[in-house]
Image (cartoon, helix red, strand yellow):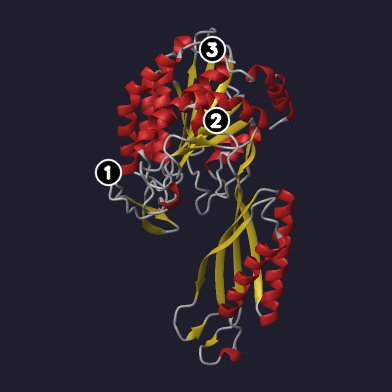
Amino acid sequence: MTFAARAALMAAASLFATPALAAPDAAAVDAAVAAVTPEVVAWRRDFHRHPELGFAETQTAGVIAEHLRGLGLEVRTQVGKTGVIGVLRGTAAGDGQGHVVALRSDMDALPVLEATGLPFASTDTGTYMGQVVPVAHACGHDAHMAMLMGAAEVLAGMKDQIHGTVVFIFQPAEEGAPPGEPKGGAALMVEEGALQNPAVEAIFGLHVVPGKAGTVFYRPRGFMAASDRIDITLNGRQTHGAWPWRGVDVIAVTSQVIETVNTLTARTIDPTTTPTVFTIATIDAGVRYNIIPDKAVMSGTLRTFDETQRNDLVRRAEAAIGHVAEAYGATAEFSIRQNAALTYNDPDLSAWLAPVLQRAAGADNVNPASPPTTVAEDFSYFQQAIPGVFYHLGGTADGQDPATAAPNHSPGFDVNEAILPLGVKTHVWSALAFLER
């Protein structure tokens, strides 16, 4: 965020203190949300049945663009390859007048074999890393798109009561840049002008997660971790499994590298100050049970909340891995690439948003001081350009303990459709309150 943008936001802080929600009134919003809810459910199920991987969301983007055009919005497509932007210019303050706010949804699915048993479960496939894989909306982006489409319909129906402009951003490739792509969807959309023409002043977004249905939670400043991809290649010397001393055993080195990474994280970082997770998640080595291979390739993820601490840990980890490999006669190659920056909720905007979300969800259902979470979100790249707030929406099935519910990215993850109207309402009120402040 630029200094000028932050200064403008802070200058308006007194206006943020008590959101002015004069028009339209709550009853009108509630009625409009209720009317669009059957469509929202239908959209969610259709997206769920037909998921698409990052930067391949062509059918998905087509459905969204057609809907936005039907509402009379200005529509731009292929922003960030498959991204869609809709612009709603309210007429209450005159054409092109007033503030500009953005609402964002992600669009991509995951290479996951769905196991929900839903009647609209995905059976589709896609191509990932050269392989044909099952594809599923195992992270809730199907619900995100449907809720934002519903919010667009509600707000378009109130165009003559809106003082300002609402920009609807449907972003591809939130799950990270696909292999061979230098950037994911958010960074690419920002680069291609998603926040310009009109110039957006603030942005809001949500994500469904395990949690009591109907609850909303977030925190100011660092809310979701920065995410880095780690790649490690160990080079040794191939030998017979019966004669390990005649080669350099990269399998043994691999086990020591994993132990080193785990120990460095657990024994050199204070978890009470900045949560840190360093996970080795894949190992690729060997082709036969009695041959020690000459190469082992590992990949993993690093999640952090403090850039200085992150840089220090990376430096020490790379050095330690090199020392471990050298001790066995092997060599190590280490590389790191950021997948998402720290999701940083602007403190002033976060405080301002709390009563807005309480109006939508109820005062007892909003927690604006939630603990940080080590999952990551590339919404962070929008927040680097302008002030923004990202919040979570609890979506666990009624009667189920969120702690035991299938998490995001798992085959059994599902969204309680009863929360879909709430997501529409939080989007609608966030936009209206910002434009009416």
Q: Are marks 1 and 2 in contact (CB under 8 Å)?
A: no
Could you tell me residue 107's position as x and y percent? 44, 39
Question: Which residue matches tag 3?
Answer: 163
Q: Residues within 10 Å of mark 1 (few under 14, many from 20)?
A: some
Check contact, mark 1 vs mark 3: CB within 8 A.
no
Earlier along the polypeptide chain: callout 1 or callout 2? 1
Q: Nearer the viewer, residue 380 or 392?
A: 392
Q: Is residue 64 above or below residue 341?
A: above
Residue 402 in the image, given as x and y percentages of width and height: 43, 47
Q: Name which residue type carries label 1.
A: Phe
Question: On the picture, is 11 further left or further right than 59?
Answer: right
Q: Quadrant of residue 48?
A: top left
Give the secondary structure at mark 2.
strand
- Does residue 86 show up? no
User: Is 37 or 44 nearer to us in this picture?
Assistant: 37
Which residue is located at x 56 percent, y 17 percent? 435
Name the amino acid type tagged 2.
Phe
For disc 2, the marked residue is: 204
